[in-house]
Image: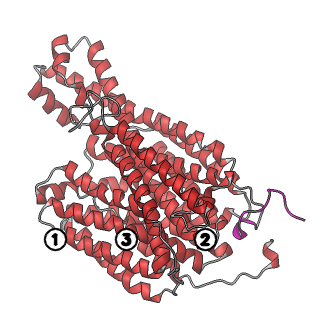
Amino acid sequence: MSAGSVVETRSSWLPLFVVMLAQVQLAFNAWNVSITGITEDLGISPTTVGLANTASTFAVSAFLLLGAKITAKIGPVLAFRIGVIIPALAAILIATAQDGSVLFIAQSITGASNAITLPALTIIIAASFQGKQQASAIGYFAASIPLAQVVSLLIAGQFASTIGWRWSFVLLASIGLINFALSFLLKPVPAQKNLIVDWTGGVLAATSIILLSFGMSVMNDWGLLTATSNAPISIGNFSIVPFLFVVAVIFAQLFISRTRKRMAAQQVPLVNLDIVRDPSERATVTVMGLMLFVGTAVSFLMPLYMQVVQGFVGIQVSFAVIPYTISIFVANTLVARLYGRFAPRTIASVSMTVVTIALVWLSFTIANDWGQLSVVIGLIVLGLAQGCVVALVFNSLLTSAPKENAGDVGAIRGLTHNLSGSAGIAVASAFAVGLLTSGAYAAANDSEVFTPEIVEQINFDNVNFFTNAQLEQVLTDRTDATDEQIAYAVDQFTQSRLDALRTTMLVLGGLAALAIVPARRMPGFQKDDLYVGYPESDEKKS
């Protein structure tokens, strides 16, 4: 169907504004720049703060598929209201917390409520917009995530440095209350009250996802194969992480088998697998997963290096990553203008090629100066390409699915985002630390400055991205190293850290290159066809 054969009615942009503000609330992250304040105020360790933060990710990932069906059953607008008011109340709990246990409880509640909010946002967009306006709305919706990241970094970083970290969560609660009030301006979307929810399938899926997510989160500390000294439990000398992954796969297979049986029996499944039945649809999900894996890994490594290695404070980190985050936002909002000229497979393959080039460029140019022009250019190019892919793949999935499956599309998008992001952080950090360990060990053994006795006193099992001051303190307290040897170690460790970061960026570029192949298998829409669903072939119909 060509654009000239139909007259497209444009709808009010109000639903998009409400949905975007809700996404800003969900993506607002004050934790990364509030760690110091929280640890000092509540008397807990940074690791505990990190675990509390991930509690939300575990909960939303575990219940997202189930949440999509609950959203459809109670109605997306009601689900929206529940999904914004509960995190607002949880934010108040965090803002008034007096001990660390409250953080875990509040974040778990937030994650569980987000499991119904994310599908609701997708359904509201699908029901509120059509055609080109829907494509633009999806781009703006995707852009609200980097927008929230920029806003949260700047505001939370400033609050943490001035009036205190608690005020960031007061602001977050206020946004939630505003979203709750705005929800009454949304047009009602009919609920599927007679929908039967597959609770057994939900338990199978949740168990698999929790085991997988937990395994990835502890992989660094507990060890991937061999148990480390930090592992609280092990099987002989082996880490339990591989066993967690195996059990997760078993539960995933049970869930998929049950879902297929329900679909064959004409029963409502927890998630409609027909969404990814076509090879082009599976290719779209693959590209989404690889891009989010790479993008999340980069987004994690940069602030880590800036804060831990270079000693940047929250607001400095915020300004350093702004070029990258803003470029993602710009690409999310503008990529829809390319849909009428180029096929999704063309946009995706070119974008993934650019991502690969940008990461390779950064791996050779990145240094300790994040304001260096070559680094800034690399980050901007990377962000533009990444933003194009993220918005495109979501739009491709949503336009290919019937409206009644919009919630399932939102669930799959959210699940892919969380699992790929968790995997990206876990694998990239483990790889970078492994490179750092091997580099430090080789430098120490090959050195003529270090004696064998000093090398034996260094615990290479706990090498991490320490600051120079921390390294000096460790060597002073735990070894007999002289001042000359400590100075030499600091110089070598500084270079090893930079080499580890550069090599990890290069490997991430290689993974991005792998996504070019499935990108070429994405839909090949002709001009004006994107907005009416998948065509039967890539050739223009006569």
Q: Which residue occupies the foreground of this view, 461 or 358?
A: 461
**Mark 1: which amino acid?**
Thr
Which percent across, then down, holds residue 508? 49, 39
Image quadrant assignment for residue 436: top left
Which percent across, then down, holds residue 142? 51, 65
Residue at the spot x=29%, y=21% of the render?
441
Q: Earlier in the sequence, mark 1 or mark 3?
A: 3
The region drawn magenta spans 529-542
Q: Which residue occupies the foreground of this view, 4 or 425?
A: 425
Residue under label 1: 96
**Compared with residue 398, is residue 71 higher up or lower down, i.e. above or below?**
below
Q: Residues within 10 Å of mark 3 (few under 14, many from 20)?
A: many
Alpha-carbon distance for marks 2 and 3? Answer: 21 Å
Residue under label 3: 25
In the rendered structure, the answer to whether residue 475 lies left or right of residue 341 reads left
Residue at the spot x=51%, y=87% of the render?
188
